[in-house]
Image (tube, rainbow, N blue to C red):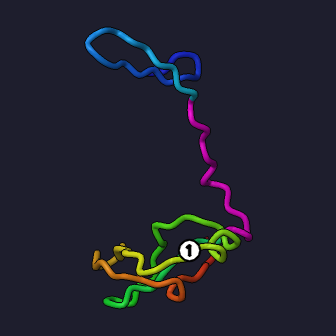
Amino acid sequence: MTLGGHFLAFRGPFLRVFLYPRPRRVDTDRVTSDDHVLSVTCPACGASFSSSIQVDRETFDKMRLDDVLERCSACHEASRFDKSAYSFRPA
C-alpha cells in the first residue's frame, strides 16, 4: 500500500504504521554501448549466461572470488566458477 510516494507497512496486533520511501525505478530500457554484463560459460552445455553477481569492471577487478556457485539458465546445471572463468560481454 502506498501513501504519497511512501510504502506503508503494518505490523503487530496493534496498528503501527511505518513509512518507507519509495525505491527509485531503475531504467533498464536504456542501454548504452558502455554497458556490459558479467557472464560465464556453462561447462555442461556450453551456453553463456549472465552471472548472479552484478558489478562493474572496476569493482570486479578489486574483488576476490573463490568457487562461486552459479546455475546455468539454459540447462539449470549448478557449477562452481573461479574468477578467471568470468568475462564481460555487451548487454
**Does the magenta segment cover residue 26?**
yes
Q: Is residue 87 left or right of residue 44?
A: right
Indicate the position of residue 69 as horizontal and vertical percent values: 37, 75
Compared with residue 8, is residue 56 higher up or lower down, i.e. above or below?
below
The residue lying at 47 percent from left, 72 percent from top is: 51
Compared with residue 53, is residue 66 higher up or lower down, i.e. above or below?
below
Which secondary structure class fits the magenta region best?
A: loop
Viewer-proximal residue, 17 or 28? 17
What residue does disc 1 label? 38
Residue type beneath disc 1: Leu
- Which span is picked out in magenta? 22-35
The residue lying at 60 percent from left, 41 percent from top is: 25
Secondary structure at numbered mark 1? strand
**Quadrant the C terminus occupies:** bottom right
Indicate the position of residue 43 as horizontal and vertical percent values: 36, 90
User: How busy is the neighbourhood of tag 1: few (under 14 within 10 Å), some, or many (20 plus)?
Assistant: many
Viewer-proximal residue, 31 or 68? 68
The residue lying at 33 percent from left, 89 percent from top is: 45
Indicate the position of residue 41 as horizontal and vertical percent values: 44, 86
The residue lying at 45 percent from left, 77 percent from top is: 49
Q: Quadrant of residue 22?
A: top right
